[in-house]
Amino acid sequence: MNYYKHIIAIVSIFIAFSSCTDEFDTLIKDPIALPANPDGQLSFVQLSMSGDRYYQWRANLIYSGGFVQHYSGAWNVTEFGGRFKKNDDYAHAYWRRAYAIEMKNLVDIIATTNGVPEKANINAIAKIMKVMTGQRLTDLYGDVPYSEAGVGFLEGVVTPRYDRQEEIYASFFKDLEESFNQLNANGGAVPGDLFYNGDISKWKKLANTLRLRLGMRLSEIAPAEAEKQVKAAFANGVFDSNADNCIMHHIDIDFNGDITDFRGNGLAQALTANDNADHFSSLLIDFLKNHDDPRLTMIATPKTSSGVIWGGAIQPGEDLYVGIPGGTFQWDVFGGATATSGIQPYLKENTAPFLHVGYSEAQLLLAEAAFRGWVSGSAADYYKAGVEAGMKQLTIYGAADPSQSAINDYLTNYPLQSGTEMEQISTQLWVTYLFNSIEAYSNWRRTGYPVLDAVTAPDSETGGIVPTRLYYPNDELQKNEANYLEALGRMDGTNDWLNKVWWDAN
Amino acid sequence: MISVLLPTDFSENSMNAITYALEFFKHQKTEFFVMHAYQNDVYDHEKLVSREDFDDQTMDLPSSATSGYEFISVNAGKLRNEGVEILLSGTPIKTNDFTWEVNLNFTKNKNKVIALHPDIDTYTISEARWAGASIVAKVGGEYGAIMGQDFLRTDKGEVIHGDNGLPLFTNEKVVLGNGVPDWTAGLNNRFTYKGVTLQFLLDIKQGMDVYSMTNSVAANKGLLDVTTQGRDAYNAALAEALVADPDLSVSNWVPTAGYVSSGVVNTGTADNPVYAPNTTPVNPQNYWATVFERTPAPFIYDASYVKLREVSLGYEFPRSLVQSLGITSLNLSAFGRNLLTFSNNLPNIDPESMYTSGNGQGFEYGSLPSRQSYGLNLKVTF
């Protein structure tokens, strides 16, 4: 027995003296973890913004593209975007991906480069891109988590507050101004920048052009603030030519089922994956055709079979360019898919570039600003420059250069006319935003132009009314209940897509 | 955990022991063994009441996408399992030639989430592939609740329809059922008469629901009987309309006949609703596609069942006979498994069908029903 007692005593002493470590920090550190690589994260987010097939398909093509009648005909575009039917997966695609991929990496880049002088440029660039992602989010959904978004790891916030859109816009303007001032020659190289290859002067112009876009967005709800922001953006210097355009160049990598391989163009892949069933709407095709617009052949191909004899040869006098009415399936059109115009094949290549922000857009927005008397210069001249740039910007996809005479004819025949300025400018913006339907959807809600074709499908869930926002994922009620309910409370209590976002005062 | 043996001989001492033991149970996991003495030992039985707390559970808690992360790992989860398990076995009849043996086990388990995370009070156990349905456990609430959007209903429960004849839906998910059974039991009977043995086993699971995606997908594809309602009328009306107007856009045509979903339409205002019966016909294909897309509600069924799991009939050949053949014993039996299923209005699927195993019980999609099998056993002992 004594023997055992000794052992117990020794063990007890051992336990008593082997105190717990106080070096938890080293213990929990992953010895093989890679250090953060903000340059790589930057490339990843830039690729995601146009290479993410998942949300390009659902948020850009199906819902936004269907809502504003850029496209019509394919099953999913027509059924859900064209006829206003709810599909949770489609409605929530952007939300799920933007926060988990873009926002998370952007707040991380900003946090790891904050206050580091030689990282000032990448820090400013990440802030600008956070505005780009945040802008799509709040424009699509309304009040959304922004100031506390994506910091689940950094700050442990797992139930972010839903900020009011008004506050989010205020922080956009602040961040854009700050980034514009922060970008400088000594702020360090940005090797991960795929938009501008680290060209700081271009980033400065992008910050201002975004500020112009977002300033104009407030034209109906807060005209004084809108004017102030537009003036500041204009004074600081927006895009000067198509050479300043913010473009993502993609490479020929197939989707291959890897939902985070963003190297190919996501929208182009979606158009292909829709089995070539997508068509441009008749609203778009007719608008281009009726104005002898050189853009028609740059984006669309002629139909290949008759619209009067099913499957037959095209008869004399038939229009070669035919779109599909909004809310109508391609098989509802007499003659079927081949009796309507197709989408130019280069727009469906993995390598198709993606235009995020452009000179054409800037000039058209300035035309509106000049029309409102907010900036100097003639609205008609800005309009002309914007339309011409809108035609020329299509060459990045592989379209042949439009002839200058065709452009000039268009500009001479269809100048900005008194009394229809808003409609003309907004309709041109709608064409300029063709492959960025998310942006077209925002501008359409702000201005109400172009007037869309009425949707009379009997199974429309809204009775033919175009939704004015996308609804929140309803698992937010389970996962972020208090903040979610607070946001609903500010929106008449329902998470409906006929509620309007703050700036949509029309 | 402590184990307490409780005598139940109806004496004062045994009562004191029970009272004392229950005090333990308030504070810690306790296993009770109930020992009950009968006049003769026809019955053995065992009853196990338990409560077990799982503290500091490491769990991946689904979190709002807006945090940047789909899951957060927490260390502080606390789950509680309370259960009763009763095993009862006995031999009600035993004569020289005939015996009847019974085995019964009964289990009732209740899971509860006591604590998760300071900011998140709902644990999403499983998410369905369609209609946004999920199975959740809320702190303090029931475990395994099946949640999803429901039809919009009047106070009387009637489905509200839009002017176009299609049903309307709630914006939020509501509790539509629960996938965890109230109780399960197994009952085995064995009759032996001379060398003949008849045995059958019943499996019983009661009080749980299932969201059957097999049925919802079948409805969407028009494979269920119910989807033919209104079909012929719709097709006839459409054919007539096409004769009248060959250029008709079929999908934009407002049906003049078709499926009329039962329920009401609001003919008043949103604030002062006036409900009238819905009379607007729709394309049945549209109706079922919409319902499939938006709500699991019509495809949630009571999944309770009683199964005749196994029946066997065996014969033990007389020793005198087989020993002359040089073998010790010879037994021949025939058996059948999964012979009968009694369930309550659960169409087209086996009540045991699954979607995800384990914690996701309450979903079902496209799994093969349990096999029915028959066979013969010949057992020879030398």
Image (tube, coloured by chain):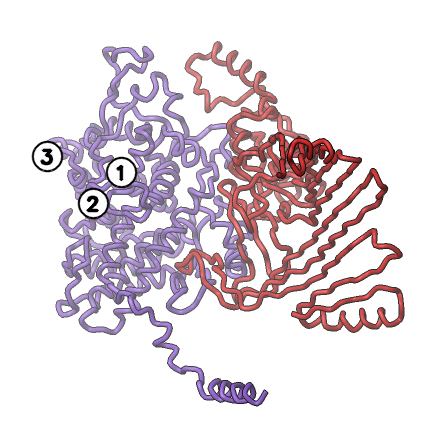
Chain colours: A purple, B red
- Amino acid tagged 1: Ala
Find numbered disc 2 in the image and state the secondary structure of the residue it sits on.
Answer: loop
Of the numbered discs 1 and 2, the one sitting upstream in the chain is 2
- Residues at marks 1 and 2, common chain? yes
Label number found at residue A404: 3
Mark carried by residue A250 = 2
Determine the secondary structure under disc 1. helix
Decide if residue A403 is on the left or right side of residue B275. left
Q: Give the percent coordinates (x, y) of residue A201.
A: 14, 60
The answer to whether the residue labelled 3 contacts the one labelled 2, judged by CB atoms less than 8 Å apart, is no
Task: Give above or below for B10 relative to B184.
Answer: below
**Residue A173 in which image quadrant:** bottom left
- Residues at marks 3 and 1 on the same chain: yes
Identify which residue, A476 or A297, lies in the foreground: A476
| Residue A245 vs residue A367, the one in the foreground | A245
Q: Is residue A490 visible?
A: no
In the rendered image, which quarter contains the C terminus of chain B?
A: top right
Which image quadrant for residue A89?
A: top left
Is residue B244 visible to us here?
yes
> Three-letter amino acid code at disc 2?
His
Q: Nearer the viewer, mark 3 or mark 1?
A: 1
The residue wearing badge 1 is: A268
Residue contact at pointers 1 and 2, CB within 8 angstroms: yes
Label 3 – label 1 distance at C-alpha:
28 Å
Residue at the (87%, 55%) spot, across then down: B40
In the structure shown, which secondary structural element does the residue marked by tag 3 occupy?
helix
Q: Residues within 10 Å of mark 3 (few under 14, many from 20)?
A: few
